[in-house]
């Protein structure tokens, strides 16, 4: 799945999907995963390039 194109604001997409950042490290933001229910953040998204990873299900994309 590709969530970034040159005109897309990744932060706006996260907000529209009600995905809230729990912790951030530079351009990487850790969130609760929108792909499954959880209490601890296993989903990370890079706000610069749109890359993402779910460490629970080991899925990735850009």
Image: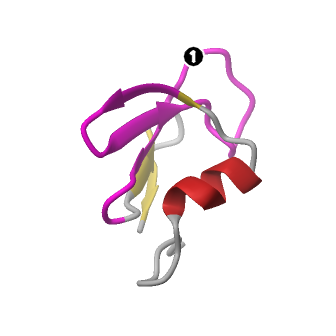
Q: Is residue 38 inside the magenta stretch?
A: yes
Observer-nearest residue: 61 or 21?
A: 21
Q: Most extreme residue toward the left, as rendered? A: 26
Residues in magenta, as a range: 22-49
The residue depicted at 32 percent of the width and 65 percent of the height is 49
Count of residue discs? 1
| In the image, farthest residue toward the top | 39
Is residue 3 placed above or below 26 in the rendered structure? below
Residue 4 drawn at (x, y percent): 47, 74
Q: Residue at x 54, y 72 (%)?
A: 1
Q: Quadrant of residue 19?
A: top right
- At x 50%, y 29%, the residue is 42
Give the percent coordinates (x, y) of residue 29: 41, 37
- In this rendering, the answer to whether 26 lies above or below 47 is above
Mark 1 surroundings: few (<14), some (14-19) or many (≥20) residues within 10 A: few
Q: Position of residue 61 (x, y in %)?
A: 44, 64
Which residue does the numbered mark 1 point to in the structure image? Answer: 40
Q: Is residue 47 positioned above or below 32 on the image?
A: below
Q: Residue at x 61, y 58 (%)?
A: 12
Using residue 60 as the reference point, say whether residue 27 is left or right of it: left
Identify the element where label 1 is drawn: loop
Q: Position of residue 11 (x, y in %)?
A: 54, 54
Query: Would residue 45 be counted in the magenta stretch?
Result: yes
Q: Quadrant of the C terminus?
A: bottom left
The colour scheme of the drawn protein is secondary structure
């Amino acid at each position: 799945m590709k969530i970034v194109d040159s005109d897309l604001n990744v932060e706006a997409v996260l907000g529209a999907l009600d995905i809230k950042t729990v912790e951030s490290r530079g351009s990487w933001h850790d969130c609760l995963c929108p792909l499954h229910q959880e209490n601890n953040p296993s989903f990370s998204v890079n706000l610069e390039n749109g890359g993402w990873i779910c460490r629970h299900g080991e899925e990735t994309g850009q």
